[in-house]
């Protein structure tokens, strides 16, 4: 069986991590398989294929383009592909082989602010609706996302398989004080700190965290809040809010950091605070746990499903409540130890080897469905 992976978004955070880790886990489990990797230009080395029979191509083919609808089917035919896995929501409308699609979430339908362009929102709805209709099997990453796909797109539950993602092995606890000192110096972190990692979107709820941090500082004045991620135009808005709240000197914006630096920033922090209002999975919560960090989280969407009993939950819409939860984790040694240990136990549910095994099962299901119906959809 020759499996093609559409990996053109592998450079994107979140979905790109899913693509890389999943494919490499599948290669480890089925090294004798036959694979085609469709990668972006300059991405030839992003997948470690070892000695597997994997062909790599990098067509000049933009994601979300009309041209991909014509060229992708031709690529699949030329390379005699038996199954296509689209680890993002885009499928070509015409396909010469059965297909599996991963729908991580339906954020573009629920939080329209995530897609600023009206045309972009129309295209997103059109393509995600087509993908769930055309795919032989749908994979999603949480029970919450499965229910949202059913609610928003009217998909038959039997067509969807929930397969939890794993955690990249790069995220593990670091204990080197020299490295901690270097990373603190680089980002001018003067005190013990709370950390939050994510892009800037209204649903990520950075503003609520700033308001909670203002309350937190009234009890614990010697602390920093470190916001990690490419915030783009949102950084100026958040800086203005921090100034208005009188906490600007305590808030640090790192911008984009690579995974090695993120691991260090997690490991050196005192608490991870996640005020997000909508997540299909919530990678950073688990990555923080993997680095030995206690987590305070909003009790929203997929977050309680993924964090389980290993997080302290609070309502980010209530600054005092969220601030108190962060303060308790920040100052209570026994609570911190309890959450860290529960975090280690919780991580056992998320393993890329399990993800790969279950995903390979979904491939065989898709082929069986296609064979039974005699159709590609």
Image (spheres, rainbow, N blue to C red):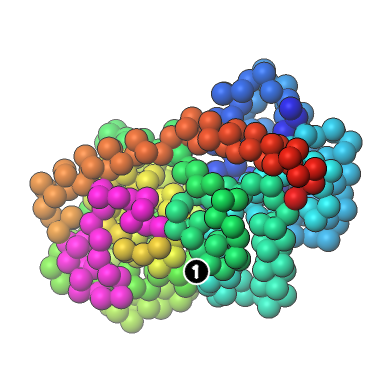
- Disc 1 residue crowd, few under 14, some 14–19, many 20+, Cα 10 Å: some
Residue carrying label 1: 201
Residue 221: which quarter of the image? bottom left
Where residue 181 sits in the image (x, y, percent)? 30, 42
Instruction: Name the residue nearer the viewer: 344 or 83.
Output: 83
Rendered residue at 33%/82% (across/down)? 244
Rendered residue at 72%/21% (across/down)? 53
Rendered residue at 56%/51% (across/down)? 158
Rendered residue at 66%/72% (across/down)? 121
- The stretch in magenta equals 302-327
Point out the image quarter for the N terminus: top right
Residue furthest to the front in view is 372
Where residue 148 sits in the image (x, y, percent)? 51, 63
Residue furthest to the bottom in view is 244
Residue 292: which quarter of the image? top left
Where residue 252 sits in the image (x, y, percent)? 36, 61
Q: Secondary structure at mark 1?
A: loop
Do we see residue 149 in this rendering?
yes
Do we see residue 215 in this rendering?
no
Q: Main secondary structure of the magenta part?
A: helix
Is 131 magenta? The answer is no
């Amino acid at each position: 069986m020759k499996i093609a992976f559409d990996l053109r978004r592998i450079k994107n955070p979140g979905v790109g991590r899913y693509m890389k880790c999943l494919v490499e886990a599948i290669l480890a489990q089925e090294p004798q398989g036959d694979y085609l990797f469709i990668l972006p230009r300059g991405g030839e080395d992003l997948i470690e294929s070892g000695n597997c029979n994997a062909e790599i191509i990098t067509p000049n083919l933009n994601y979300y383009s009309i041209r991909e609808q014509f060229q992708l089917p031709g690529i699949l035919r030329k390379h005699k592909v038996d199954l296509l896995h689209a680890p993002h929501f885009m499928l070509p409308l015409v396909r010469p082989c059965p297909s599996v699609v991963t729908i991580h979430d339906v954020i573009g339908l629920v939080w329209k602010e995530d897609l600023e362009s009206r045309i972009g929102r129309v295209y997103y709805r059109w393509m995600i609706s087509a993908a769930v209709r055309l795919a032989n099997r749908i994979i999603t990453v949480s029970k919450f996302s499965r229910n949202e796909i059913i609610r928003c797109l009217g998909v038959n539950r039997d067509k969807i398989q929930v397969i939890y993602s794993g955690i990249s092995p790069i995220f593990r606890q670091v204990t080197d004080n020299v490295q901690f000192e270097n990373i603190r110096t680089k980002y001018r972190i003067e005190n013990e700190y709370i950390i939050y990692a994510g892009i800037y979107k209204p649903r990520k709820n950075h503003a609520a965290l700033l308001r909670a941090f203002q309350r937190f500082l009234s009890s614990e004045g010697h602390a920093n809040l470190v916001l990690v991620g490419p915030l783009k135009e949102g950084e100026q808005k958040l800086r203005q809010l921090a100034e208005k709240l009188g906490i600007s000197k305590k808030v640090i914006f790192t911008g984009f950091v690579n995974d090695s630096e993120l691991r260090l920033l997690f490991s050196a922090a005192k608490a991870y605070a996640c005020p997000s209002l909508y997540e299909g999975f919530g990678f950073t919560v688990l990555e923080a746990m993997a680095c030995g960090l206690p987590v305070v989280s909003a009790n929203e969407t997929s977050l309680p499903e993924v964090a389980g009993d290993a997080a302290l939950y609070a309502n980010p819409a209530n600054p005092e409540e969220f601030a108190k939860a962060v303060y308790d984790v920040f100052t209570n040694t026994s609570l911190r130890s309890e959450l860290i240990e529960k975090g280690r136990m919780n991580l056992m549910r998320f393993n890329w080897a399990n993800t790969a095994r279950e995903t390979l099962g979904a491939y065989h299901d898709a082929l069986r469905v296609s064979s039974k119906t005699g159709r590609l959809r």
